[in-house]
Amino acid sequence: MARGSWTADLPKAAPILDLPARCGTGPVTYVPALETYLLVAWHIPTTLKKWFEPDEVRYDFYQAAHPWGPWTFINSLSDRFIVGGHMYGPSICAKFQERVGPDVRLCLFTSGCPFDDVPQGIYKMWMIPLVLRTAPPLSATMVNDDDPRIAYHGSWTVSPRRGFHDHGDDAHWTNTPGDSAELSFSGTGIEYVAEKNADHGKVEVHLDGKVMETVDLALVNFPRLSQVTVFGTRSLKPGPHTIRIVNRGPGYAVLDAFRILGGS
């Protein structure tokens, strides 16, 4: 910024971010690995009819070379993945930052509305992982849970029009251990998109016949979450692959969708 941009005369001060009705307070955080600053502003995009029961809360992310800007919009996140609750008051933590290959992992702290365990509570502090990707974006193709390319084995049930903000507003679920679902695809990456809830269990993820990870779909002291990427890899060799998920219980296993990266 030019030296002439600075002044001690407060009436001449100008906002660093001018977003009427879209600029809820949020601190500026420096990311040393990227030599850049991040700012997250939160807002309610529709008219608030009752306090505090919005239809949706959005987090808008910005970056800048200096804490005073100019700020460039990066992306926007809707909190509709939280079923029956909302979040607000975001803060990107300046500590616990980690560079992993082309990615930088941070912690986003936010407040959440009350839910069933303590109905009279006002605030909940949640920590949500935040990943900054610096590599060129890969093409992404969503394969919904009702796609005929997915082969289901066992006693899976389909639930359409659930109203939980699933991809396609539907999901497949099973509570029988050993039930599985698999998809053959071509690409350089794959992600398993599921739901998380208190009564869910563990799901074993296989890739090309090898057990990759066991993901836990259960939640403690949290509302139901939809469209959560619970497993993902972006380092596959180009060509055909097969992903298989197996319910290991105890509880429900859910398949919302697969996301194919760099292929189809």
Image (spheres, rainbow, N blue to C red):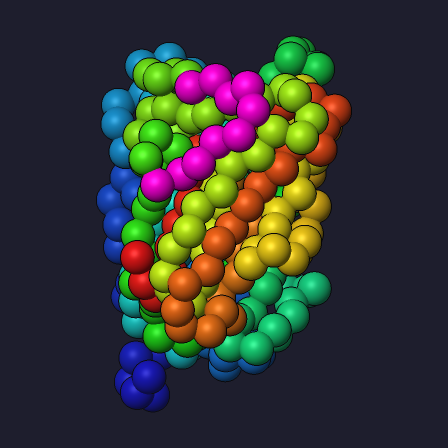
The picture quadrant where one finds residue 144 is top left
Residue 240 located left or right of residue 255: left
- Check the picture and name the quadrant holding the N terminus: bottom left
* Position of residue 85 measured from the top left corner of the image (x, y, whole percent): 50, 23
Q: Residue at x 50, y 81 (%)?
A: 35
Using the image as rendered, state which of residue 97 and residue 6 is in the foreground: 97
Q: Nearer the viewer, residue 90 or 149?
A: 149
Q: Is residue 170 visible?
A: yes
Q: Residue at x 61, y 73 (%)?
A: 100
Q: Visible in this render: residue 223? A: no
Extreme residue in the bottom direction: 3
Q: Position of residue 240 (x, y in %)?
A: 41, 63
42 sits left or right of 232 in the view: left
Image mark count: 0
Task: Inspect the magenta stretch and tell me whether residue 245 lies in it.
Answer: no
Q: Which region shows up in magenta?
A: 149-158
Residue 155 is one of the magenta-drawn residues: yes
Q: Quadrant of residue 42?
A: top left
Task: Left or right? Give the position of 107 relative to 229.
Answer: right
Q: Is residue 20 above or below residue 164?
A: below
Q: Residue at x 46, y 73 (%)?
A: 237
Residue 182 vs 177, above or below: the answer is: below
Residue 8 higher or lower than 110, as above or below: below
Tell whether 205 sits left or right of 51. right
Question: Where is residue 71 drawn, in percent x and y?
Answer: 32, 67
Quadrant where the image shows the C terminus: bottom left
Q: Position of residue 238 (x, y in %)?
A: 40, 72
Which sits in the foreground, 73 or 219? 219
Q: Look at 33% across and 16% down and name the residue there.
A: 161
